[in-house]
Amino acid sequence: MTLLIIYSSTSGNTEYTVDVLAKHLRGSSDMEIKVQRVEESKPENMKDCDILMFACGTWNSVREGQLSPGFIKFVSVAKEFDLEGKGTCVIGLGDDRYFYTCKSTAHLMQFAREIGGKNLLPPLPIVNDPYGQEEKIIKWGDKLLSAIQK
Ligand SMILES: Cc1cc2nc3c(=O)[nH]c(=O)nc-3n(C[C@H](O)[C@H](O)[C@H](O)COP(=O)(O)O)c2cc1C
């Protein structure tokens, strides 16, 4: 079983979140965890896994509450891809100083659904810095493992 995590990170918050999660999943399952920055990923890479995860912060390109620039580009080139019911899950980061807090979560969910993903569990929103939120990340990782086992 292979999990591919495609993520983007501008200040390192999503990268830290994904690192904590990947370390936990590697330590508590025999799943292969592959991690790719969205800028270095291609839509066809999404074939090379059993479970797919998208993770990114919320950004203000033109207006607030958008995906990061890297994900906007990826979504535009990957929108014709068909995941054929592959299991998907998402992590979205944001900051409560913004009105559309963590809106990347909803955008990533919509993208995964539109390309034929089957959502495995409610998303993980990380509001403000992820440092100190490791327990929340780990608990969500355990829920992901349970969802995969079902
Ligand atoms: C230019 C800019 C725009 C942002 N816009 C939003 C936003 O609209 N909504 C929100 O919840 N967070 C917003 N944020 C906060 C980031 O999503 C948050 O800091 C996140 O943890 C960044 O993750 P990253 O370092 O992995 O990119 C914005 C941050 C920056 C720098």
Image (tube, grey):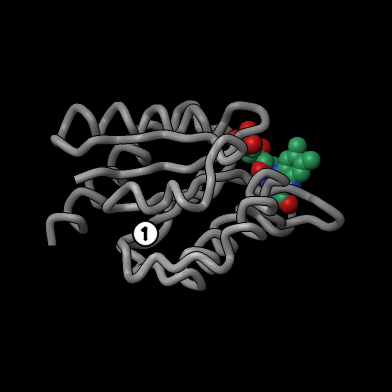
How many other residues sit within 10 Å of disc 1, few (<14), some (14-19) or many (≥20)? many
- For image coordinates 47% across by 64% down, the residue present is 112
Q: How many numbered callouts? A: 1
Residue 133, image quadrant:
top left
Asked if residue 127 is positioned above or below residue 40 in the image, the reply reads below
- For image coordinates 30% across by 35% down, the residue present is 33
Q: Residue furthest front?
A: 44
Using the image as rendered, state which of residue 79 and residue 5 is in the foreground: 79
Q: Is residue 149 visible?
A: yes
Asked if residue 69 is positioned above or below residue 16 in the image, the reply reads below
Estimate the x, y position of residue 41 in percent, counting from the top left.
53, 41
Asked if residue 12 is positioned above or below residue 7 in the image, the reply reads above
Q: Is residue 97 visible?
A: no
Residue beneath label 1, please? 88
Location of the C terminus by quadrant is bottom left
Asked if residue 85 is positioned above or below residue 78 in the image, the reply reads below
Does residue 95 appear to the left or right of 35 in the view shown? right
- For image coordinates 36% across by 43% down, the residue present is 4
Estimate the x, y position of residue 145 in percent, counting from the top left.
20, 48
Estimate the x, y position of residue 25 in percent, counting from the top left.
24, 35
Judged from the image, the secondary structure of the residue bearing numbered disc 1 is strand
Using the image as rendered, state which of residue 4 and residue 106 is in the foreground: 4
State which image quarter holds ligand 1.
top right
- For image coordinates 19% across by 27% down, the residue present is 27
Estimate the x, y position of residue 17 in percent, counting from the top left.
46, 33
Does residue 93 appear to the left or right of 123 in the view shown? right
Q: Residue furthest right?
A: 62
Does residue 100 appear to the left or right of 7 in the view shown? right
Amino acid on which disc 1 is placed: Thr
